[in-house]
Image (cartoon, coloured by chain):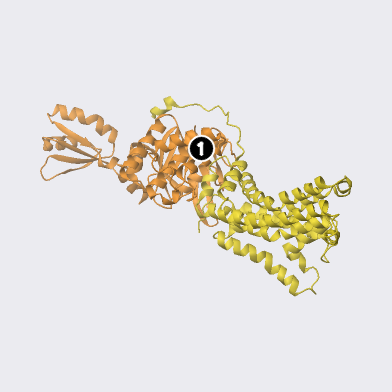
Chain colours: A orange, B yellow
Amino acid sequence: MRIQVENLSKWYGQVIGVNHLGFTIEPGVTGFLGPNSAGKTTLLRLLTGQLKASQGSVAIEGEPVWNNYKILSHIGYCPEADAFWGYLSGWEFVTSLLRMHGFSPSEAAEKADRAIDLMDMQEARSKRIAGYSKGMRQRIKVAQAIAHDPDMLFLDEPLNGMDPLGRRATIDLIKRLGGEGKTVVVSSHILHEVEEMTDTILLINHGRLLAEGNIYEIRQLIDSHPLQVTIRCDNVNILTAKLLEYEDVQSVHFDRERSQLTVETNRPDDFHRRLPGLALDNGVKVHSLWSPDESLEAVFKYLVR
Amino acid sequence: MPIYEETYRAWHGQLAARPRTWWIIARTGSRLRWKRAMILVLLLAALPFLVRGAQIYVAMRLGDSPELAEMVQELQIDAGFFADFLRGQAFFLVLVLILAGAGLIASDRKFGALAVYFSKPVRFWDYVLGKFLIVAFYGSLITLLPCLLLFLMRVLLAQDAAFLQEYYWIPFSIIGQVALSLLTLGGVILVLSSTTGGSRSAAILFFAMLTVPDLLRQILPSISGLGLVSLPAVLRQTSALLFGLERPFDFSAWLGLGVLMGVAGLSLAVLKIRVRPTEVVR
């Protein structure tokens, strides 16, 4: 399912939650990335029809989301804050919410079992949620979101409080659901979390969309910050001399051992196309090549500063 | 760019029929409120029913006995009998509404569960109706059900159809009076549950809202129409109207009916504002 957002704004009195957002979310995993209070939760609530937009629209496959309860059958939502009744067991919690989708008691039980198994919560299924650890509560929240096999999944900071194993399993699950063609939207303020789940991101800050696309595309938008490429090779001096003949190369730095150099270039595509030829022609053996700038953290720093 | 587009599953707009979520909310909520305190109050509330049932039995079956003749003569089983029974149950009704309703919305707000509710195919009306049915269910268990059973008992124990012919309208009056009580008192407890921080404060406020205006009415009898601000007084007045009895207060019963409708409408309006999944940004 495709989500279309047009000119979307939401304000609470004088406070602006999100401001003139416009984008389209395709099936697969999309990450909403931004610092705390960036407007991610507000945006997720607008996308799931829980908030009425002050201006603009959200549509799923052309159908407006606001006041359209039918759409909600296709949505799974995992809120950031704890959202359950502590006196219920995890299994009761998931089952009772499944019943609201119209499943019979036996269907709901079956689906709840499957979701709980998927989130590795079998042992704690009959315990009261009040006694759950933070990680367990997080996992049961994700379980209720995926239990009815929705076409769209909205997960607000889903990895908060999870242990490393739980994080790994949840990241794998999210990637798998995205690969199956579901539309999965994940919000996070932790850069590497989103980076592990998807290349497709929307950077949000102060309710505004800073950038959208994959990490590399976003990086290309930042003209004022040349791309850094680190090359580990022999014959560092020869390669440096050859690289400096090109206009797009802004600077070259060596390390002390002269085993690697870091190049700053304004035209990364041209640079990458050119490099293999240069190395071959000049007998330079390239051991490894990476771009520290392509990490999400670097992109985020540039855009959110 | 994205390889996942190859596995995209088109959606042709055929969506599942809407489930009756209000019924699921009501059922689950009612089950969760079936606790020791509630059972105890329900059992206590059954005592007046047993006494009234015994009175009917004695009047109908042992009325000819010379030892009981005097007592039976005093005991009139007419419209007033059923109205009195409902009035006597008012105290238990308040307790039951507190036990069933004070935490209903407060706990959802406290636990942030509204966000989860409204991410399911649940509308405002489903939610409110579901919650209202929980208080209505328990409220009816100690008012509507026993009162109708008493009427049925009276009819079945009668030798002829004279009572039924004369008082066939009483079940409608019972239903009407219970509906008015539950709509207003149930609405108020849900509003308090949604506006106060927790079930305890909702319970205290509910009790205060019912007793303080009624005390004022009793302390200041000279002020005409003060009874209109007391829900118990207004309910007694409408009860008198519905059961065809002498009005206990000097204000119009129809005006009282209007007050009750106003309270119910206001409750709904407040709930519409309070029952939202949104976070408040300040």
User: Nearest the camera: B82 or A119?
Assistant: B82
Answer yes or no: is residue A223 visible. Answer: no
Hey, which residue is sitting farthest top in the picture? B6
The chain holding disc 1 is A
- In the rendered structure, the answer to whether residue A103 lies left or right of residue A267 reads right
Q: Quadrant of residue B274?
A: bottom right
Q: Position of residue A27 (x, y in %)?
A: 45, 32
User: Nearest the camera: B213 or A251?
Assistant: B213
Q: Position of residue A224 (x, y in %)?
A: 32, 45
Total marks drawn? Answer: 1
Q: Which residue is drawn at the image coordinates 50% and 52% (left, top)?
A: B111
- In the rendered structure, the answer to whether residue A229 lies left or right of residue B267 reads left
Q: What's under tag 1, amino acid-wise?
A: Ile
Q: Is residue A15 above or below residue A109?
A: below
Q: Is residue A143 above or below residue B235?
A: above
User: Nearest the camera: A288 or B131?
Assistant: B131
- On the image, numbered disc 1 is attached to which residue? A75
